[in-house]
Each structure stands twice: as C-alpha cells, then as structure tokens.
Image (spheres, rainbow, N blue to C red):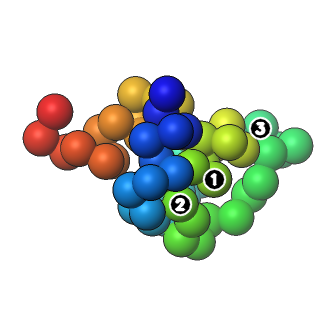
Amino acid sequence: MAKLISSHDRISACFPLDTYPRPAEKSQYEGSRSLWSALDDDIITTEQAREIGDPLS
C-alpha cells in the first residue's frame, strides 16, 4: 500500500547512509530519490515513508 500511495504523491528526499543505513548489496546512492524508489530498493521502511510523507502523523 505504501508503494501505491507513494507512486502518486511524487515526494522525493535524500537518504544519506548515516541516517538510512543499508547492506552493501543495496544502492549506496545518497542523492534525491522518490519515496517509491526508496521503498522499492529497501532503503526505507513503510513506517519511515509514512514519517517522510506525513511528518505530522
């Protein structure tokens, strides 16, 4: 569901390794990317996507 919602909202953010650590086999790119892309690449969790997409929740 999170990927479905993020495919319509067009929110992008940077995901630095120190804040969003990930295994070496995952993308190490730290520049701007969409929430959908970050979810699809397992850079962030659905909970993190919710916090980024709706910081007041």
Image marks 3 and 2: residues in contact by CB distance under 8 Å: no
Is 4 positioned to the left or the right of 42 in the image?
Answer: left
| Residue found farthest to the left | 56
Give the image location of residue 35, x and y in percent. 50, 52
* Secondary structure beneath label 2: strand
Above or below, comparing residue 25 to residue 8 in the picture? above
Task: Mark yes or no: residue 38 visible.
Answer: yes
Image marks 2 and 1: residues in contact by CB distance under 8 Å: yes
Q: Which mark is residue 37?
A: 1
Is 26 positioned to the left or the right of 50 in the image?
Answer: right
**20 or 5, which lies in front?**
5
- Kindly report which numbered mark, 3 or 2, lies closer to the viewer in this rendering: 2
Give the image location of residue 18, x and y in percent. 53, 51
Residue drawn at x 40%, y 28% as measured from the top left = 47
Give the image location of residue 10, x and y in percent. 43, 63
The residue carrying mark 3 is 23
**Residue type (three-letter) at the residue carrying disc 1:** Ser
Q: Which mark is residue 34?
A: 2
Along the polypeptide, which appears first: circle 3 or circle 2? Answer: 3
Above or below, comparing residue 29 to residue 50 in the picture? below
Residue drawn at x 44%, y 54% as measured from the top left = 8
- Kindly report which numbered mark, 3 or 1, lies closer to the viewer in this rendering: 1
Q: Which mark is residue 6?
A: none
